[in-house]
Amino acid sequence: MAEGQKLRDRILVSGSLAGFCDLALEVFRFQYENCPVSREFADALSRNPGNVRKPEEIPFMPVEFFKSRDIICSGMKPLLEFRSSGTTGSIPGRHFLADPALYDTSLLKGFSLAYGDPAGYTFLALTPRPEENPYSSLIYMINKLMQQNSQLPHGFFLDKPEALSQRLRDPSVAAGKTILIGLTYALLDFAEKYPGNYPGLVVVETGGMKGRRTEITRRELHERLKAAFSSAGIHSEYGMTELLSQVWSSGSGIFNTPPWMKVLIREVNDPFSFCLPGRTGGINIIDLANLYSCSFIATQDLGRVTKEGSFEVLGRFDLSDLRGCSLMLQE
């Protein structure tokens, strides 16, 4: 569809805050007119392009909708499917991508904004391999980053911790440009069995334990990883099946969104009111790159934003479903 192509060409271009707000309203109108689930949800709340004047007034779709509805624009074919992880017997969320190239562009540009060209990095992963879980957005992301330079010795090591330990002792790791990224419980398991001094290594954790181990705060997690991976930098990645983009933190769990994303914090007891910077509430995400699905998602994560627009994730709402990448081996 021609209008979608025009929006697509503008979304990943950096712009002013005013430009972002205008584009967000255009994307809302586009999805209202072309995505039946988005229109149904907005109409149920009596919010539509005729009475929504700013992004804060856009209805944010609960992430749980992806468990029961196929959220994709009419006439678009799903060329790629991601599925969320969940407890045994639970219903996974499904995200249908009509434009995998847009996903790849967002992924690579978002990483480049945080770290530079991914072709310059060696990626070591504590996750299953792509063939073991072809519906994982996290594994897809890692594999895509590896593909940017197939000459480097990348690898998946979830079932080969001893081999990973040997790889981390290679002098090339100390020279920098090596990223160890993995499921949080797997990183902790490895850290307890193979602690060591790894100067130059960047360790990227991707979320909570989600049933594999006892949940701990991100601060405690980073303290444990720092104690085990002496001299390594401890970073974070935040993403989810239902989004198209990821965000990265270079330390302390503070995330910075790329220009096509924005985080709003909703009041816990009023989903249509938003918190001031520094106050804790539910995380709402605007991901304009999620053009052919839904760009306005209300998550079950708790967090807060800073005056500068960065944010941190503090936990989950009580009684929300256990879900996330760390359960992918239990399905």
Image (cartoon, rainbow, N blue to C red):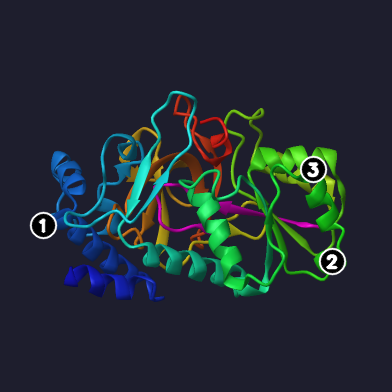
Residue 49 x, y percent position in the rendering: 14, 57
- Above or below, 19 relative to 287: below
Residue 121 x, y percent position in the rendering: 68, 69
- Quote the CA–CA distance across marks 1 and 2: 57 Å
Which span is picked out in magenta?
231-247
Residue displayed at 84% across by 39% down: 193
The residue mark sitting in front, 3 or 1, is 3
Q: Amino acid at mark 3?
A: Ala
Q: Identify the disc placed on residue 115.
A: none
Q: Which residue is at the front of the view, 32 or 317?
A: 32
Mark 1 surroundings: few (<14), some (14-19) or many (≥20) residues within 10 A: few
Residue at mark 3 = 191
The reply to whether the C-beta atoms of the residues labelled 1 and 2 are less than 8 Å apart is no
- Above or below, 318 relative to 250: above
- Name the N-terminal-most of marks 1 and 2: 1
In the rendered structure, does residue 241 fall within the stretch colored magenta?
Answer: yes
Farthest front residue in view: 131
